[in-house]
Amino acid sequence: MKVIIVGGVAGGASCAARLRRLDENAEILMVERGPYVSYANCGLPYHVGSVIEKESSLLVANAAMFRTLFAVEARTGCECIQVSPDRKTVDLRNVATGEVTTEPYDRLVLSPGALSVRPPLPGIDLPGIFEVRTVPDARAIRDWIESGSMFLAGMHRYSGFQTVRPKTRAVVVGGGFIGIETAENLVHRGFDVTLVEMGDQILAPLDQEMARVAEGYLEKHGLRLALNDGVAGFEQGDDGSLKVLTQSGKVHPADIVILALGVRPDTTLAKAAGLAIGQRGGIRVDDQMRTSNPDIFAVGDAVEVQDFVTGEWSLVALAGPANRQGRIAADVIAGRNARFRGTQGTSIIGIFGGAAAWTGASEKTLTRLGETDFEKIYLYPNSHAGYYPGAKPIAMKVVFRKSDGRLLGAQALGEDGVDKRISALAMALQLGATIYDLEEAELCYAPQFGSAKDPVNFAGMVAADVLRDDMPLSHWDAAGDGLLLDVRMPMELAVESVHNAVNIPLDQLRARMGELPRDREILVICRSGGRAYFATRILNQNGFKARTLSGGMLARTHATTFWET
């Protein structure tokens, strides 16, 4: 059996290695149009920022390694220009010489990846405007930073007298993973960085109120955000610097511009071969990674996959799913009954020592799909035991089904412990767990690592209290005309308060219940929700109609106050 794999990096390279482990006799040819078979493109922004100093550190495997360890013929600088399904052949072009050869196959795996979105804006090809998609891209950015202009090249040090080096300026266009990571690394390199995003928030998978927490953190660390403003074009100044022109008429000066406008599936070969393309523009595959042609498979950023929670077709350009898809394609080619479960979009991004992470469906996705059988909670547990030094709060949002408690999604932001909480919740979600399962989850505990009631347990307990009606819940956007009862101490109100709220500290509530109406709903608030829950229990057991406002004051203002806790 001869298997040709078009494209390396994550999906294609993992497919080649897995297939060889399963079938020692298969003839495997892997072609990659770029200079590297497999590289860590997730590390590119950190190479730009010199966190990863050596370019060689990004190279996961080379052609020689595939030949010697896996007996895979790996050709770099080799581009597949045509697939002929009827003849079961591919035409391959040597990028350096232009020579075209034809190779037959028994099975074909397409792993062409995705292309950076590069709209035809005026001036987009000016020098100093870059993308961050490949190792050569990162190398070009580093070279420009070192020699792209008089001050970037350090001429202020060689002019015969010392001058003050001006603040070098960068504009990053796009508020997704690559844009934010590159912006952070340019800040670390001393640039004055502006991030321009056409949408009304960064990190589109997050619900907006959670994105606001991340935005506040970025601004706290010196990154300037320009949201709700798309780029209209680029101009070059007389001194060689750049101007980024936006749709609102603003002009952002820059010495370097990074385009991070997202990616789109590379479906050129698939379309020409007559393969089915899905509604989202990716190659349509089944759960065994087969395309509409049973002898052609496709994996990675170019394919559409089904969302594990919603069942929607989606595009997920992540290394984890690409690697799993490559393995599954190899298993199926080798005769095994492997299947891809779909993706829940589990992701994390580091931001100046903090992190934002998520898994599963967001509230806005469920709302867009017309779903109503769900509830959400906000909570702010410590990353580990509060009495052990260094504990940091985690802002968490958990979404679950009202009818049966099934976990649907979760989002978290913080400076410690975010990754393991979302990882635990991601596994629970994939296994179909409910919030009642989270209550009972047995997780490792020592004071420097967590709490006896881990944030994952805590999320389950709060959500279960809601479904058992132990904690009737409301949210700030649905507060209506209920009476706001603030059960914090008076000194806390000097920091943040809500107009017209009645203040009765929790420790005085039982003695002062006579001050509250019994014919009106009472919405109880505190700093983060804990004391409000206690107060709700007291009031409801004494004949009042009370609800807890989920997340308290932090859920109302945490974009500006969460990082100060």
Image (spheres, rainbow, N blue to C red):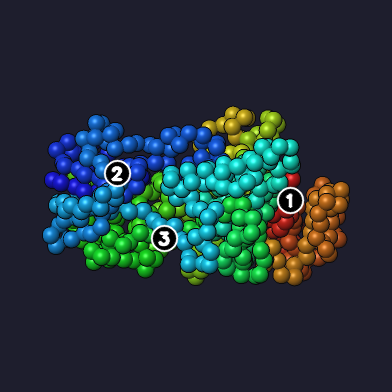
Q: Does residue 67 appear in the picture of this structure? A: yes
Residue under the image location 26 percent in, 49 percent down: 97
Residue 100: give its label: none
Residue 138 appears left or right of 329: right
Residue 76: give its label: 2
Residue underneath mark 1 = 561
Height in image: 55 above or below 331? Answer: above
Height in image: 481 above or below 434? Answer: below
Distance Cα–Cα, label 1 vs label 3: 37 Å
Residue under the image location 40 percent in, 63 percent down: 312
Q: Position of residue 2 (x, y in %)?
A: 15, 46
Q: Position of residue 306 (x, y in %)?
A: 37, 59
Residue under the image location 71 percent in, 46 percent down: 166
Residue underneath mark 3 = 264
Q: Earlier in the sequence, mark 2 or mark 3?
A: 2
Mark 2 secondary-structure assignment: strand
